[in-house]
Image (cartoon, coloured by chain):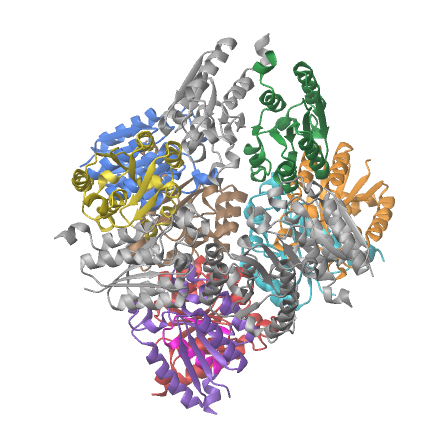
Chain colours: A red, B purple, E yellow, H green, I blue, J orange, K brown, L cyan
Amino acid sequence: MPAVHVINGPNLNLLGAREPAIYGGATLDDIKATLVERCAAAGVDLIFRQSNNEGDLVGWIQEAGRAKAPVILNAGALTHTSIAIHDAIKGSAANVIEVHLSNVYARESFRHHSFISPLARGVIVGFGPLSYLLAFEALFPAETRKT
Amino acid sequence: MPAVHVINGPNLNLLGAREPAIYGGATLDDIKATLVERCAAAGVDLIFRQSNNEGDLVGWIQEAGRAKAPVILNAGALTHTSIAIHDAIKGSAANVIEVHLSNVYARESFRHHSFISPLARGVIVGFGPLSYLLAFEALFPAETRKT
Amino acid sequence: MPAVHVINGPNLNLLGAREPAIYGGATLDDIKATLVERCAAAGVDLIFRQSNNEGDLVGWIQEAGRAKAPVILNAGALTHTSIAIHDAIKGSAANVIEVHLSNVYARESFRHHSFISPLARGVIVGFGPLSYLLAFEALFPAETRKT
Amino acid sequence: MPAVHVINGPNLNLLGAREPAIYGGATLDDIKATLVERCAAAGVDLIFRQSNNEGDLVGWIQEAGRAKAPVILNAGALTHTSIAIHDAIKGSAANVIEVHLSNVYARESFRHHSFISPLARGVIVGFGPLSYLLAFEALFPAETRKT
Amino acid sequence: MPAVHVINGPNLNLLGAREPAIYGGATLDDIKATLVERCAAAGVDLIFRQSNNEGDLVGWIQEAGRAKAPVILNAGALTHTSIAIHDAIKGSAANVIEVHLSNVYARESFRHHSFISPLARGVIVGFGPLSYLLAFEALFPAETRKT
Amino acid sequence: MPAVHVINGPNLNLLGAREPAIYGGATLDDIKATLVERCAAAGVDLIFRQSNNEGDLVGWIQEAGRAKAPVILNAGALTHTSIAIHDAIKGSAANVIEVHLSNVYARESFRHHSFISPLARGVIVGFGPLSYLLAFEALFPAETRKT
Amino acid sequence: MPAVHVINGPNLNLLGAREPAIYGGATLDDIKATLVERCAAAGVDLIFRQSNNEGDLVGWIQEAGRAKAPVILNAGALTHTSIAIHDAIKGSAANVIEVHLSNVYARESFRHHSFISPLARGVIVGFGPLSYLLAFEALFPAETRKT
Amino acid sequence: MPAVHVINGPNLNLLGAREPAIYGGATLDDIKATLVERCAAAGVDLIFRQSNNEGDLVGWIQEAGRAKAPVILNAGALTHTSIAIHDAIKGSAANVIEVHLSNVYARESFRHHSFISPLARGVIVGFGPLSYLLAFEALFPAETRKT
Amino acid sequence: MPAVHVINGPNLNLLGAREPAIYGGATLDDIKATLVERCAAAGVDLIFRQSNNEGDLVGWIQEAGRAKAPVILNAGALTHTSIAIHDAIKGSAANVIEVHLSNVYARESFRHHSFISPLARGVIVGFGPLSYLLAFEALFPAETRKT
Amino acid sequence: MPAVHVINGPNLNLLGAREPAIYGGATLDDIKATLVERCAAAGVDLIFRQSNNEGDLVGWIQEAGRAKAPVILNAGALTHTSIAIHDAIKGSAANVIEVHLSNVYARESFRHHSFISPLARGVIVGFGPLSYLLAFEALFPAETRKT
Amino acid sequence: MPAVHVINGPNLNLLGAREPAIYGGATLDDIKATLVERCAAAGVDLIFRQSNNEGDLVGWIQEAGRAKAPVILNAGALTHTSIAIHDAIKGSAANVIEVHLSNVYARESFRHHSFISPLARGVIVGFGPLSYLLAFEALFPAETRKT
Amino acid sequence: MPAVHVINGPNLNLLGAREPAIYGGATLDDIKATLVERCAAAGVDLIFRQSNNEGDLVGWIQEAGRAKAPVILNAGALTHTSIAIHDAIKGSAANVIEVHLSNVYARESFRHHSFISPLARGVIVGFGPLSYLLAFEALFPAETRKT
């Protein structure tokens, strides 16, 4: 079973420090820690990465696509501007769940369009760190794990 | 603890029969059955409704708001056109999670805007019937339930 | 052979009284009477309804779709605003001919777009009550009936 | 002399409870009570209604139009989306004064357009419950009443 | 009684060969043959023309206008671009019924606007060759012909 | 108690002469006369001005703002173009009721947007000279005056 | 001295018959007759043409450009749609005065843009047949002619 | 016979000095001098004015309208922004010919729309000072003057 | 092997004379001469045409489509406006390479959209006469010819 | 050496009183005082003006242009609406530095476009009164002054 | 003679694997191999690069510009979003031919605009790997190479 | 006191070589040299960087934000496209002054919008290298430095 790839885009390294009123106090390491635990329980490997570079995200998505591994993708600001990420998903047939911590639809209008959503298996928005866990749940539903 | 209100809008009664390529073969009763089970396990009541009438949805959201009950809302086509539902959520301070079965962002452009999203606690799109379960999970995270 | 469903939307009950310069002096009952006669001649049943409620139209279209019955649909103002009716047609695979009494393209620009047209078998606009008869003719061409 | 029809749209039943910072603390019953008093003083009957259903509003406007009765109309959210209400006013030649409690022009841009305004005798916006009284005053100017 | 002018625009000479999935297998000659028959039965003359030149269509519409003859007009692609044809109809006060074989509203957005529709007596769209016959029916209703 | 400032913009000096079909036959002096009477009855002073100059209106609004005096403002055409008037209201915290004689929403689309409305306490549109009186009523409700 | 080329586009052959309320009762021959007279007085030749075909206008403009002859151009409806005419003027460096009989700016919005105006020496709009004479005057000012 | 009113808007006092590549070397006084001469020849009075103030133009147009005097109006930049001038023309029923020295359609797009054109008797653009003379010619055609 | 059809639209007959700064000094005959030579070398026939009439281009494209012959198409200004040419390509399944001499993307925005491009096998823009030769190369790659 | 012209538009006279949260507590006189000091130190004269009238600003910019004097221009609300000021700068070739106290790009979208910026030597936005001093610095860099 | 720089943007490393229905089965190495051969035959060096990073492309274009070397640029998704690449071309005066494998004009509308095209010497779109060879041909026409 | 961070985006390394007509002849090193001198005089450290990579800029802004150091930011082309930079400023609460060498408002419309401006303390545009010095001046006003 291929590892779950969790890919985080620009400024997500600021989490915790960054605008806690919007994003909450949890850091990206906190989110990683919870996912590590979940993955251990589910018996799957985890690859957890963050970059401020579009090119890194493009490469990591291609890598996951080649590995036929599921992707939980929070591309941050690049969600709204990057056709290159769109093409990486399409070109590598990556299986992507798009997540966002904040409710992007309640914020500036330039955050309302996503180049990722039309290619995603599903989209989960606005639950804070829980968004990642719900995406994990979508990949490995509790029922399945129990058995 | 107030009951979970699951409110479904126009044409969701067609589920199963309706465009299975987009919506899958599960019926609305199937979804209800799974949620009944989940609610029983979590020890919460469930109010599960569907209507083709905007006015019914407005009233049910007001009712949930008054009861301070969480709402899982799939308003169907009204998602994109109903300011009345927007006002019902805002006016009754309802705690709403917006769900959609299909990936609305991969469909016609008139399905890309939602009058509900900016007021929702979170949005879950594209997972089929699993969308409802993830919303339930968001309301009652597994960890919490276990304890 | 399933009955022909003729479904009329908001304010069509005003016909005759309503803006005769635009809509002519015939009432909805006059239109029904002519269609009753035509249906009798063609040996098909007629279900003729009007409502000011979007939900009623959604339900009636679903009903016709389930019955695999042809629909002559004049959704009035809802033509231009109702995605729910669009979804009812699509979801129930209803066989719909869209009609309008007045020439909507010669009126306000908000009447120029129809959520029904892209799903209709055909569209007939601007002939007054004759629009309904032409739609009936399209369903049961004279040649066919003669034989 | 025909009764004054006061017609209220979706969510106005929430008044008082709903967003008091925007709408004030008065309930719809409070507004009705004041109008009852005014009507008594002016010697006219009052028909005061509220519904969350577009179809109800369409029907009530038609009814007022047939009765040649003046209408004070606060269609709430439907103001901005309902061509059916537009057509009801036009088709029944109803004599409508449009009112709003809050200053819709100071709120979201989707509240800036009204399908009712172009057909209204006049528009009164932003005075809270006083909006209804000013509309009444417009129908029955104080001078007239005194004599 | 003036002849019926049936005027066809660019590429309608391709009918039958052209995109049969959209336009069906009938040729323009097949359509003409059916209309010839109908006209004979109704006792009216038929002028049936096709051109790929905007100028020809402008001239033929002027000619029909001068003759006070009814026009069944399928201007093809020029429907969406030709103000000259719009002006020919308006300037010669031609009595035009606009027809289209395919459902233009289900195709590219540049086919959704027509410069002809606002000036047409009526518009019939999407019935294949039957569109022409329905237009003929609109000009000479069956009832009339029987007597 | 500060005086009521009634401020009129460009071309309102034409009233009576100007397009009586739209504006009625009353002159600006007639309106002033009625307000003089009302103010006398209510025991408040009246400052009634008209100018064709944007700068004058800006200055008068600043003056009213400084005096903490209520303003009845009919800025005429400047309503739709003057950010300077917008800023005068905002900058001087003037208490403004916006009035229009004609129903601007039933006229050209360039009259549908107002730079004043979002800053006004309320907006009264379409009642002819009565618009001013209703604004006065809004400032000094009849009940209050009686006592 | 090269001849003056007066080039008229689609439907100008209808002049006199066509919408006299907009275009007046003069025919294109009347306009030609007046210009013949003026040209004779000024001692210049006149080439006066009309066509409903864009290609003819393109060719005639090229011809005038090659001859370095001044052009009075009323391209009718093609004014608003023909980039080919734009290119003919630009490519042949034709010296063009654009004229219109009616006030195009007071008509439908699709008549407000001209592909000719940016390349014209000047534009004269709305004076009926006088528009042509003013264009002639612009080419041969009266002062000049007198001497 | 009322005087001809020639009204010039902002920055036309710069003529001659201002961007001679666009506007030529003639000053506003030069233009006035030529018109004085023409008026003398035609036996009409001339009122020739310039202002940088919108309010002045509004007043002068009202004055001309009251006097039923023809207006040659070059409103300069206000052409594109002033609804007040639009209203002055409409409200005083002024008989206006709009002129521009430069070809506004060959310049920035914000100069392509005029609030004056739809109300003007005619529009003359791009002939430099000759634009004024052609407007005069339109008011007093040479033929008329000769007799 | 069917002949190569090279089809040229409006104003391409001006080449050489027309705006040499943009289009270079070569004439259309020069381009034809080079292609004649290339075709001879490749052993294919050449049909080389130019017209200012949209209808001619529509007919020639239909002809090439019927002959299953490759088309090198420079539709000039009609590229941007002609849905009729779009339909001719689609309806006759013509195999079209779109070429332009100048870099249309570096010119006016109305030259940036092409109704031909979405249906073309490929698009070659901006190389002057070389554009035609590259298109020929695309049809008959050098490698192939050598063998 | 010509004097520095500092020109202030509508409502800047409110400074200090006006929205201190946005504009700070300094008055226009305070700004003038600081500039007087700077000018004295730099040995240049200062002309410091404010008006609520567009016409005044147009005239003052023309005056500065004629004097070849540098202009520090804060046109306030007219920045966003006045083509007349744009033309005054262009027509008089004035050397303008545009300044704003508040960060206009962080405010309403109608403040994001400036008719002045494209003609300015430079633009300085958002530094409060310091904006004026930085503009002065740009005209007379400290290094220069020291020497 | 400077080397030919062939610069490939994001996801072109996926070629062959990526969406073969759109891009064909050739890999980027296949394309490179063919170009190596062509360059050898033409006696020019080849620099062939690919990156998923916008910054790399900016740098390589600058490098080619400094070397006065011709560039064949397929910027992939960055074509449509990168002003930085636009500026690199403009700032280094690079001689760029833009190529695309697929017909971008037949795909999503966000692929129809290119920030590169207006600065390119020419654009070649839709010929698969042949697009690169045609670009090479444009740089080194066969005729030239033969001699 | 934290160092001043001067951060330069894509293509600013080309300065001096790049389009001197727009950007002048100074190189980025020249600008750095001047700032080094100023910083020495003011007693603050300077961190001066340039990159063509969005990710680098994001990281450097985060770094400055963490250090609570003031930022002079010329993001070049990324100004107009990078929401990631916007988020870096917002997320790290960086104190940013936005500068541009050229007057972006006098250039292509895609340079008129900045994702940085709404978050900047101030914006300085169009003064060439002086823009950086004015930004420095804004951070350390001369008065302050003197003392």
| Span colored in magenta | B122-139
User: x, y percentage for residue J9?
Assistant: 75, 46
Q: A135 or K143, which lies in front?
A: A135
Q: Is residue A112 visible?
A: no
User: x, y percentage for residue K126?
Assistant: 34, 47
Left or right: residue B79 versus residue I134 is right
- Eyeballing the image, is H135 above or below B8? above
User: x, y percentage for residue A46?
Assistant: 42, 77
Left or right: residue A112 versus residue J56 is left
Q: Residue at x 51, y 82 (%)?
A: B69
Q: Quadrant of the C terminus of chain J?
A: top right
Residue B136 is one of the magenta-drawn residues:
yes
- Eyeballing the image, is I4 above or below A46? above
**Residue H50: quarter of image:** top right
- Eyeballing the image, is J77 above or below I28? below
Q: J46 or L67, which lies in front?
A: J46
